[in-house]
Amino acid sequence: MKFKGTVTVWLKEGIFDPQGAAVKGSLEAMGFKEVEKVRIGKNIVISLDAENALEAKDLLEQMARKLLANPVTEAYRVHVEEEKAGAER
Amino acid sequence: MKFGVVVFPGSNCDSDAYHVIKDVIGVDCEYVWHETRDLSDFQALVLPGGFSYGDYLRCGALARFSPVMDSVYRFVDEGKLVIGICNGFQILLEAGLLPGAMLSNNVLEFRCQWVDLRVENTKTPFTCLYEPGEVIRVPIAHHEGNYYAEPEVLEELERTGRVVLRYVDASGNPTAEANPNGAAHNIAGIINEKGNVFGLMPHPERCSESILGSRDGRRVFLSMIKSLETGALLS
């Protein structure tokens, strides 16, 4: 079965994110006074073939642990959905 | 004695390191393509600066899975010397050969400038020709040089003398102003527990000849050569 996995990676709480801080400054300068915090992470979208959703999630977890996130500084979350045949990505 | 300079796709300080070792100092040196697995000819390896794999995903994260890295682990186990400069340091961190990780500089700048460094530990194969506490002038050029490690890791590095280089002001004090990137404890370079893997953000290969404004970096390579020749400080 085809699956679409999304691995979201972001800097752990408490680690300074200069990108987020810079964007927050610009949002404030634009007049969005409501902004309290901005953190920037990344989404890594992976199409893969697996027996079932559980196996797909397990494979994506392994990829995240070994490569996609650095456990010292980053946290991650894995989301899996079934990919419909012929669906646009 | 032979040095190897590992070349990853995107390395760009490889020829500087090769030039210093081979032409300036006069020790045998060879480029090592990242797909090489046989490192038996070498006693010391340089992981040079640059942008391996375009710095994609995270600096050093993809280079760490290059074929040569399996052999680098064995090389380290055998007690041979590995120095990682700038991107090479980032690769050593990603590979787990040194503890901690690099974050983006805490300023919104790529920092390309001269810095003053204090040599904190001279009982290493990479710094044995410096004076304890000596302040040297070396250039940096990086965007991700903000060294980070958990508090207990930092404490252990400090307690065991594994912080080898620290950013300081001209009088040798590790002030916040002298810290170009936000690195924890002003750390510019650290060594592994065994003492044969050294990672540093500054570029000693860019200041090993007077014509380049400083020769302070040359003794890093001369220290390695001396250690290899005498066996001193090798595990």
Image: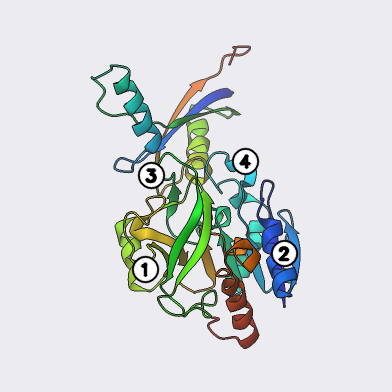
Q: Chain of mark 3?
A: B
| Residue B227 image position (x, y, % from top left) | 59, 82
Q: Earlier in the sequence, mark 4 or mark 2?
A: 2
In this figure, which residue is indicated by the disc labeled 2? B19
Q: Are marks 4 and 2 on the same chain?
A: yes
Q: Quadrant of the N terminus of chain B?
A: bottom right
**Looking at the image, do the residues carrying marks 1 and 3 touch, with CB atoms under 8 Å apart?**
no
Which numbered circle lies on residue B172? 1
| Residue B157 image position (x, y, % from top left) | 37, 67
As helix, strand or loop, the secondary structure at mark 2 comes to: helix
What type is the residue that disc 4 sits on? Answer: Gly
Which numbered circle lies on residue B106? 3
As helix, strand or loop, the secondary structure at mark 1 comes to: loop
As helix, strand or loop, the secondary structure at mark 3 comes to: loop
**How would you rate the neighbour count of disc 1 (Cα within 10 Å): few for under 14, some for 14-19, many for 20 or more?**
some
* Nearer to us in this view, A85 or B110: B110
Q: Alpha-carbon distance for marks 1 and 3?
A: 22 Å
As helix, strand or loop, the secondary structure at mark 4 comes to: helix
| Residue A32 image position (x, y, % from top left) | 28, 17
* Nearer to us in this view, A40 or B79: A40
Q: Chain of mark 4?
A: B
Q: Quadrant of the C terminus of chain B?
A: bottom right
Q: Alpha-carbon distance for marks 2 and 1?
A: 30 Å
The residue at 38%/54% (across/down) is B183
**How would you rate the neighbour count of disc 3 (Cα within 10 Å): few for under 14, some for 14-19, many for 20 or more?**
many
